[in-house]
Amino acid sequence: MKILAIESSCDETAAAVVEDGRHVLSSVISSQVAEHILYGGVVPEIASRRHVEAITPVVREAVSSCGLTYDDIDAVAVTHAPGLIGALLVGVNFAKGLSLSLDKPLIPVHHLRSHIASNYITHKELEPPFLALVVSGGHSHIVEVRDYTDFSVIGRTRDDAAGECMDKAARALGLPYPGGLNLDKISADGNSDAYKFPRPTVSGSEYDFSFSGLKTAAVNLIHNASQKGEEISIKDFGASYIKAVVRSLVENTEKAAKALGYKKIVIAGGVSANSVLRREMTKLCEKNGFELYLPDKSLCGDNAAMVGSQGYYEYLSGKRADMTLNAKATMGIDE
Ligand code: KG4
Ligand code: ZN
Protein backbone atom coordinates (compact mmCIF):
# COMPACT_ATOMS: atom_id res chain seq x y z
CA MET A 1 0.00 0.00 0.00
CA LYS A 2 1.41 3.39 -1.03
CA ILE A 3 0.63 6.37 1.17
CA LEU A 4 1.25 9.97 0.15
CA ALA A 5 2.06 11.79 3.39
CA ILE A 6 2.11 15.50 4.19
CA GLU A 7 3.70 17.34 7.13
CA SER A 8 3.46 21.08 7.88
CA SER A 9 3.23 21.33 11.68
CA CYS A 10 6.08 23.79 12.18
CA ASP A 11 8.71 25.17 9.81
CA GLU A 12 9.25 22.31 7.38
CA THR A 13 6.95 21.69 4.42
CA ALA A 14 7.33 17.99 3.67
CA ALA A 15 5.78 15.26 1.53
CA ALA A 16 6.71 11.62 1.08
CA VAL A 17 5.50 8.40 -0.47
CA VAL A 18 5.84 5.40 1.86
CA GLU A 19 5.03 1.79 1.04
CA ASP A 20 3.56 -0.50 3.68
CA GLY A 21 4.72 1.76 6.50
CA ARG A 22 8.38 0.86 6.23
CA HIS A 23 9.74 1.64 2.77
CA VAL A 24 10.33 5.26 1.82
CA LEU A 25 9.91 5.68 -1.94
CA SER A 26 10.46 9.45 -1.80
CA SER A 27 10.84 12.13 0.85
CA VAL A 28 10.97 15.84 0.10
CA ILE A 29 11.55 18.53 2.75
CA SER A 30 11.48 22.25 2.13
CA SER A 31 12.95 23.96 5.18
CA GLN A 32 12.21 27.53 6.18
CA VAL A 33 15.17 27.77 8.56
CA ALA A 34 17.02 30.36 6.47
CA GLU A 35 14.15 32.81 6.88
CA HIS A 36 13.37 32.18 10.57
CA ILE A 37 17.07 32.60 11.43
CA LEU A 38 16.56 36.34 10.93
CA TYR A 39 14.13 36.40 13.89
CA GLY A 40 15.92 33.91 16.16
CA GLY A 41 12.98 31.47 16.10
CA VAL A 42 9.92 30.36 14.15
CA VAL A 43 7.51 33.20 13.32
CA PRO A 44 4.14 31.42 13.01
CA GLU A 45 2.58 33.69 10.42
CA ILE A 46 5.63 33.53 8.16
CA ALA A 47 5.64 29.73 8.56
CA SER A 48 2.01 29.50 7.35
CA ARG A 49 2.67 31.68 4.33
CA ARG A 50 5.75 29.72 3.31
CA HIS A 51 3.81 26.43 3.61
CA VAL A 52 1.17 27.84 1.25
CA GLU A 53 3.87 28.61 -1.31
CA ALA A 54 5.85 25.39 -0.93
CA ILE A 55 3.23 22.72 -0.56
CA THR A 56 2.26 22.19 -4.20
CA PRO A 57 5.81 21.82 -5.58
CA VAL A 58 6.85 19.67 -2.61
CA VAL A 59 3.94 17.23 -3.06
CA ARG A 60 4.45 17.13 -6.83
CA GLU A 61 8.12 16.31 -6.38
CA ALA A 62 7.38 13.59 -3.82
CA VAL A 63 5.10 11.83 -6.31
CA SER A 64 7.15 12.35 -9.48
CA SER A 65 10.59 11.64 -7.99
CA CYS A 66 9.67 8.02 -7.31
CA GLY A 67 8.29 7.56 -10.81
CA LEU A 68 4.66 7.36 -9.69
CA THR A 69 1.52 9.18 -10.70
CA TYR A 70 -1.38 10.16 -8.44
CA ASP A 71 -3.25 7.06 -9.67
CA ASP A 72 -0.67 4.87 -7.91
CA ILE A 73 -1.42 6.44 -4.51
CA ASP A 74 -3.72 4.39 -2.24
CA ALA A 75 -4.30 6.91 0.56
CA VAL A 76 -3.37 10.38 1.79
CA ALA A 77 -2.00 10.87 5.34
CA VAL A 78 -1.53 14.23 7.01
CA THR A 79 -0.28 15.64 10.31
CA HIS A 80 -3.34 17.28 11.84
CA ALA A 81 -2.11 17.85 15.43
CA PRO A 82 -0.35 19.14 17.47
CA GLY A 83 1.63 22.10 16.12
CA LEU A 84 1.31 25.70 14.95
CA ILE A 85 -2.32 26.00 13.98
CA GLY A 86 -1.85 28.16 10.88
CA ALA A 87 0.92 25.86 9.67
CA LEU A 88 -1.07 22.66 10.26
CA LEU A 89 -4.10 24.07 8.46
CA VAL A 90 -2.14 24.36 5.21
CA GLY A 91 -1.23 20.66 5.16
CA VAL A 92 -4.65 19.54 6.36
CA ASN A 93 -6.52 21.53 3.75
CA PHE A 94 -4.20 20.44 0.96
CA ALA A 95 -4.55 16.79 1.99
CA LYS A 96 -8.34 17.10 2.08
CA GLY A 97 -8.34 18.51 -1.43
CA LEU A 98 -6.11 15.69 -2.67
CA SER A 99 -8.17 13.00 -0.98
CA LEU A 100 -11.36 14.46 -2.44
CA SER A 101 -10.05 14.80 -5.97
CA LEU A 102 -8.31 11.40 -6.01
CA ASP A 103 -11.20 9.73 -4.20
CA LYS A 104 -8.72 8.05 -1.82
CA PRO A 105 -8.98 7.65 1.97
CA LEU A 106 -7.72 10.44 4.23
CA ILE A 107 -5.75 9.45 7.35
CA PRO A 108 -5.11 11.95 10.18
CA VAL A 109 -1.77 11.46 11.95
CA HIS A 110 -0.61 12.77 15.34
CA HIS A 111 2.79 14.48 15.07
CA LEU A 112 4.41 12.72 18.04
CA ARG A 113 3.11 9.32 16.96
CA SER A 114 4.85 9.94 13.64
CA HIS A 115 8.14 10.87 15.34
CA ILE A 116 8.05 7.47 17.06
CA ALA A 117 7.32 5.83 13.68
CA SER A 118 10.55 7.23 12.23
CA ASN A 119 12.07 4.25 14.03
CA TYR A 120 9.94 1.77 12.03
CA ILE A 121 11.67 3.11 8.90
CA THR A 122 15.16 2.96 10.41
CA HIS A 123 14.68 -0.42 12.11
CA LYS A 124 12.58 -2.66 9.89
CA GLU A 125 12.37 -5.30 12.62
CA LEU A 126 11.06 -2.98 15.35
CA GLU A 127 7.58 -3.76 16.63
CA PRO A 128 5.67 -2.60 19.73
CA PRO A 129 5.48 -2.98 22.68
CA PHE A 130 8.32 -0.70 23.78
CA LEU A 131 9.04 2.39 25.87
CA ALA A 132 9.61 5.63 23.95
CA LEU A 133 11.30 8.86 24.98
CA VAL A 134 9.84 11.54 22.70
CA VAL A 135 11.78 14.80 22.82
CA SER A 136 11.01 17.64 20.45
CA GLY A 137 10.78 21.41 20.43
CA GLY A 138 7.35 21.35 22.05
CA HIS A 139 7.18 18.04 23.95
CA SER A 140 9.12 15.79 26.31
CA HIS A 141 7.26 12.56 26.99
CA ILE A 142 7.96 9.07 28.20
CA VAL A 143 5.39 6.93 26.43
CA GLU A 144 4.38 3.30 26.71
CA VAL A 145 3.81 2.20 23.10
CA ARG A 146 1.66 -0.88 23.68
CA ASP A 147 0.75 -1.23 20.02
CA TYR A 148 1.10 0.82 16.83
CA THR A 149 -1.91 2.93 17.76
CA ASP A 150 -2.10 2.33 21.51
CA PHE A 151 -0.15 4.85 23.59
CA SER A 152 -0.01 5.84 27.22
CA VAL A 153 1.98 8.82 28.49
CA ILE A 154 3.62 7.98 31.82
CA GLY A 155 5.96 10.98 32.10
CA ARG A 156 5.84 14.49 30.72
CA THR A 157 7.42 17.87 31.23
CA ARG A 158 5.71 20.10 33.75
CA ASP A 159 6.98 23.23 31.99
CA ASP A 160 9.39 23.63 29.05
CA ALA A 161 10.22 20.91 26.54
CA ALA A 162 13.81 19.67 26.27
CA GLY A 163 14.22 21.17 22.77
CA GLU A 164 12.79 24.53 23.85
CA CYS A 165 15.18 24.53 26.81
CA MET A 166 18.16 23.87 24.48
CA ASP A 167 16.97 26.60 22.09
CA LYS A 168 16.57 29.23 24.84
CA ALA A 169 20.04 28.66 26.28
CA ALA A 170 21.58 28.69 22.80
CA ARG A 171 19.86 31.98 22.07
CA ALA A 172 21.11 33.51 25.33
CA LEU A 173 24.63 32.45 24.29
CA GLY A 174 24.14 34.27 20.98
CA LEU A 175 23.96 31.14 18.82
CA PRO A 176 21.72 31.25 15.75
CA TYR A 177 18.44 29.37 15.37
CA PRO A 178 18.01 26.35 15.39
CA GLY A 179 19.64 26.63 18.79
CA GLY A 180 19.62 23.00 19.94
CA LEU A 181 21.46 21.79 16.88
CA ASN A 182 24.06 24.59 17.01
CA LEU A 183 24.59 24.13 20.75
CA ASP A 184 25.22 20.42 20.18
CA LYS A 185 27.77 21.11 17.43
CA ILE A 186 29.68 23.83 19.25
CA SER A 187 29.86 21.86 22.52
CA ALA A 188 31.26 18.67 21.00
CA ASP A 189 34.67 18.97 22.69
CA GLY A 190 33.60 21.17 25.61
CA ASN A 191 34.24 20.36 29.28
CA SER A 192 30.89 19.18 30.65
CA ASP A 193 32.01 19.69 34.28
CA ALA A 194 32.98 23.33 33.83
CA TYR A 195 29.62 24.80 34.90
CA LYS A 196 27.24 23.54 37.56
CA PHE A 197 23.49 23.33 36.96
CA PRO A 198 20.72 22.39 39.41
CA ARG A 199 19.29 18.89 39.31
CA PRO A 200 15.60 19.38 38.53
CA THR A 201 13.24 17.70 40.98
CA VAL A 202 9.55 17.12 40.40
CA SER A 203 7.24 16.03 43.18
CA GLY A 204 4.33 13.79 42.29
CA SER A 205 5.07 11.66 39.25
CA GLU A 206 8.58 10.21 39.37
CA TYR A 207 8.82 10.12 35.57
CA ASP A 208 7.91 13.77 34.96
CA PHE A 209 10.48 16.35 33.87
CA SER A 210 11.00 20.02 34.69
CA PHE A 211 13.38 22.05 32.58
CA SER A 212 12.41 25.66 33.35
CA GLY A 213 14.74 25.84 36.40
CA LEU A 214 17.69 24.71 34.29
CA LYS A 215 16.84 27.20 31.59
CA THR A 216 16.54 30.07 34.10
CA ALA A 217 19.82 29.08 35.76
CA ALA A 218 21.54 29.15 32.36
CA VAL A 219 20.13 32.53 31.37
CA ASN A 220 21.04 34.02 34.79
CA LEU A 221 24.59 32.68 34.61
CA ILE A 222 25.05 34.20 31.17
CA HIS A 223 23.61 37.59 32.18
CA ASN A 224 25.58 37.75 35.44
CA ALA A 225 28.80 36.95 33.60
CA SER A 226 28.15 39.63 31.01
CA GLN A 227 27.37 42.23 33.71
CA LYS A 228 30.65 41.43 35.45
CA GLY A 229 32.51 41.50 32.16
CA GLU A 230 33.46 37.82 32.53
CA GLU A 231 33.79 35.68 29.45
CA ILE A 232 31.72 32.51 29.12
CA SER A 233 33.28 29.57 27.32
CA ILE A 234 30.41 28.70 25.00
CA LYS A 235 31.60 25.17 24.34
CA ASP A 236 32.13 24.36 28.04
CA PHE A 237 28.86 26.02 29.01
CA GLY A 238 26.99 24.18 26.26
CA ALA A 239 28.54 20.83 27.18
CA SER A 240 27.67 21.31 30.89
CA TYR A 241 24.12 22.39 30.11
CA ILE A 242 23.43 19.58 27.63
CA LYS A 243 24.78 17.13 30.21
CA ALA A 244 22.26 18.42 32.78
CA VAL A 245 19.30 18.18 30.36
CA VAL A 246 20.32 14.75 29.10
CA ARG A 247 20.91 13.44 32.65
CA SER A 248 17.29 14.14 33.50
CA LEU A 249 16.00 12.49 30.29
CA VAL A 250 18.17 9.40 30.75
CA GLU A 251 17.51 8.93 34.49
CA ASN A 252 13.73 9.06 34.12
CA THR A 253 13.75 6.73 31.13
CA GLU A 254 15.86 4.23 33.07
CA LYS A 255 13.54 4.41 36.11
CA ALA A 256 10.45 3.92 33.95
CA ALA A 257 11.91 1.05 31.93
CA LYS A 258 12.96 -0.82 35.06
CA ALA A 259 9.71 -0.22 36.92
CA LEU A 260 7.50 -1.22 34.00
CA GLY A 261 9.69 -4.04 32.74
CA TYR A 262 10.48 -2.67 29.25
CA LYS A 263 13.63 -3.94 27.59
CA LYS A 264 13.14 -2.16 24.29
CA ILE A 265 13.78 1.60 24.35
CA VAL A 266 13.00 3.93 21.45
CA ILE A 267 14.06 7.59 21.18
CA ALA A 268 12.30 10.04 18.87
CA GLY A 269 11.80 13.73 18.06
CA GLY A 270 14.16 16.54 17.03
CA VAL A 271 16.27 16.28 20.20
CA SER A 272 16.96 12.59 19.46
CA ALA A 273 19.60 13.94 17.04
CA ASN A 274 21.58 15.20 20.04
CA SER A 275 24.94 13.48 20.20
CA VAL A 276 25.14 13.39 24.02
CA LEU A 277 21.63 11.96 24.36
CA ARG A 278 22.44 9.26 21.79
CA ARG A 279 25.69 8.40 23.58
CA GLU A 280 24.24 8.36 27.10
CA MET A 281 21.22 6.31 26.04
CA THR A 282 23.55 3.82 24.38
CA LYS A 283 25.52 3.49 27.64
CA LEU A 284 22.34 3.11 29.69
CA CYS A 285 21.02 0.37 27.44
CA GLU A 286 24.34 -1.49 27.36
CA LYS A 287 24.50 -1.35 31.17
CA ASN A 288 20.98 -2.73 31.62
CA GLY A 289 20.88 -5.12 28.67
CA PHE A 290 18.13 -3.09 26.95
CA GLU A 291 17.78 -2.91 23.16
CA LEU A 292 18.07 0.69 21.97
CA TYR A 293 16.43 2.05 18.82
CA LEU A 294 17.54 5.47 17.57
CA PRO A 295 16.10 7.05 14.43
CA ASP A 296 18.47 7.67 11.56
CA LYS A 297 19.69 11.26 11.93
CA SER A 298 17.93 12.23 8.70
CA LEU A 299 14.60 11.24 10.29
CA CYS A 300 14.98 12.97 13.69
CA GLY A 301 13.65 16.35 12.58
CA ASP A 302 10.26 16.96 11.01
CA ASN A 303 9.67 15.01 7.79
CA ALA A 304 6.76 13.36 5.99
CA ALA A 305 8.25 9.86 5.68
CA MET A 306 7.47 9.28 9.37
CA VAL A 307 3.89 10.48 8.75
CA GLY A 308 3.53 7.92 5.95
CA SER A 309 4.82 5.21 8.28
CA GLN A 310 2.46 5.98 11.17
CA GLY A 311 -0.34 6.68 8.67
CA TYR A 312 -0.10 3.09 7.45
CA TYR A 313 -0.63 1.70 10.96
CA GLU A 314 -3.45 4.18 11.62
CA TYR A 315 -5.04 3.00 8.36
CA LEU A 316 -4.75 -0.65 9.40
CA SER A 317 -6.43 0.19 12.71
CA GLY A 318 -9.38 1.67 10.76
CA LYS A 319 -8.66 5.35 11.31
CA ARG A 320 -10.16 7.61 8.61
CA ALA A 321 -11.00 11.30 8.37
CA ASP A 322 -13.74 12.91 6.32
CA MET A 323 -13.98 16.37 4.82
CA THR A 324 -14.70 17.89 8.25
CA LEU A 325 -11.12 17.15 9.40
CA ASN A 326 -9.63 20.15 11.20
CA ALA A 327 -6.20 20.93 12.62
CA LYS A 328 -5.59 21.06 16.39
CA ALA A 329 -2.80 23.02 18.05
CA THR A 330 -2.81 20.69 21.06
CA MET A 331 -3.79 17.05 21.30
CA GLY A 332 -2.60 14.17 23.49
CA ILE A 333 -0.76 11.29 21.83
CA ASP A 334 -3.25 8.93 23.45
CA GLU A 335 -6.42 10.71 22.20
O1 KG4 B 1 10.80 17.43 16.31
P1 KG4 B 1 11.31 18.75 15.91
O2 KG4 B 1 12.09 18.87 14.63
O3 KG4 B 1 10.15 19.78 15.85
C1 KG4 B 1 9.10 19.73 16.80
O4 KG4 B 1 8.22 18.86 16.64
O5 KG4 B 1 9.19 20.51 17.78
O6 KG4 B 1 12.22 19.26 17.11
C2 KG4 B 1 12.85 20.48 17.07
C3 KG4 B 1 13.71 20.64 18.30
C4 KG4 B 1 14.28 22.04 18.41
O7 KG4 B 1 14.08 22.51 19.73
C5 KG4 B 1 15.76 21.84 18.12
O8 KG4 B 1 16.60 22.76 18.73
C6 KG4 B 1 15.97 20.44 18.65
O9 KG4 B 1 14.81 19.74 18.26
N1 KG4 B 1 17.18 19.81 18.10
C7 KG4 B 1 18.25 19.49 18.86
C8 KG4 B 1 19.20 18.93 17.97
N2 KG4 B 1 18.67 18.96 16.72
C9 KG4 B 1 17.43 19.50 16.82
N3 KG4 B 1 18.46 19.61 20.18
C10 KG4 B 1 19.64 19.18 20.63
N4 KG4 B 1 20.62 18.65 19.86
C11 KG4 B 1 20.44 18.50 18.53
N5 KG4 B 1 21.40 17.98 17.77
ZN1 ZN C 1 8.52 17.39 15.38
Image: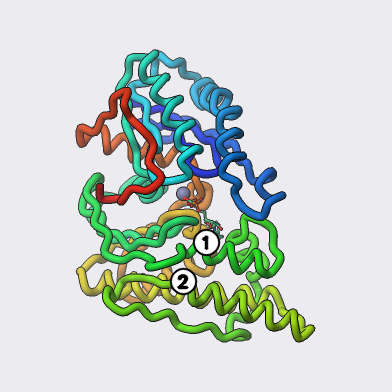
Three-letter code, disc 1: Glu
Marks 1 and 2: CB-CB under 8 Å?
Answer: yes
Mark 1 lies within 8 Å of ligand 1 (Cβ measured) = yes
User: x, y (%) of residue 4?
Assistant: 41, 27
172 over 81 or under it: above or below: below
Q: Nearer the viewer, residue 70 or 210?
A: 210
Identify the mark nearer the N-term, 1 or 2: 1
User: x, y (%) of residue 173?
Assistant: 68, 69
Q: Is residue 315 left or right of residue 99?
A: left
> Hey, which quadrant is residue 80 in on the image?
top left
Residue 211, numbered circle: 2
Three-letter code, disc 2: Phe
Q: CA distance from mark 1 to mark 2?
A: 9 Å
User: x, y (%) of residue 96?
Assistant: 39, 23
Q: Is residue 11 left or right of residue 127?
A: right
**What residue do we see at 53% from left, 83% from top?**
197
Residue 38, numbered circle: none
> Hey, which quadrant is residue 262 in on the image?
bottom left
Residue 164, numbered circle: 1
122 over 323 or under it: above or below: below
> Hey, which quadrant is residue 48 in on the image?
top right
Q: Residues within 10 Å of mark 2 (few under 14, many from 20)?
A: many
302 over 185 or under it: above or below: above
- Is residue 22 visible in this depiction of the protein? no
**What residue do we see at 53% from left, 47% from top?**
298
Q: Is residue 42 left or right of residue 229?
A: left
Identify the secondary structure beneath mark 2.
loop
